[in-house]
Amino acid sequence: MSLNDVLSAIDAEIARLQQARNLLTNSGTSTHGRKSASTKSAKVKRTLSPEARQKIADAQRKRWAAQKKAAK
């Protein structure tokens, strides 16, 4: 399991726990029945396929090589 996978799992768990806390404390609604700004649902992180991750990494290495070559 890579570091990004671990961080993604932790973020998902934090979002789930925050939703559970909001439900238990009923802090999700104000007196006017609107949701407060602090209870916006957390965006679900998208995961990249290994192939897409590799393409991004290769492109970044290419940019770094070009930058290093220009610096010489």
Image (cartoon, rainbow, N blue to C red):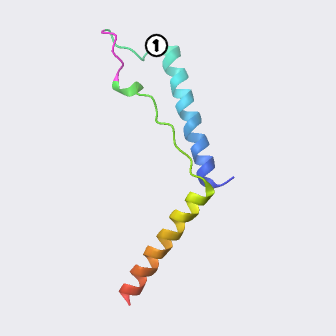
Point out the residue furthest to the left here: 32
Where residue 67 sits, quadrant-wise, is bottom left
9 lies above or below 63: above
User: From the image, which quarter does the C terminus lie in?
Assistant: bottom left
Q: Which residue is labeled 1 in the image?
A: 26
Q: Most prominent secondary structure in the magenta stretch?
A: loop
19 lies above or below 7: above
The spot of residue 30 in percent (x, y) is: 34, 13
Q: Give the magenta part as a residue range.
A: 32-36
Residue 34 lies in magenta, yes or no? yes
Foreground: 49 or 31? 49
The spot of residue 58 in percent (x, y) is: 53, 70
Residue occupying the point 55% across, 34% down: 14
Residue occupying the point 63% across, 47% down: 6
Foreground: 66 or 7? 66
Q: Amino acid at mark 1?
A: Asn
How packed is label 1: few (under 14 Cα within 10 Å), some, or many (20 or more)? few
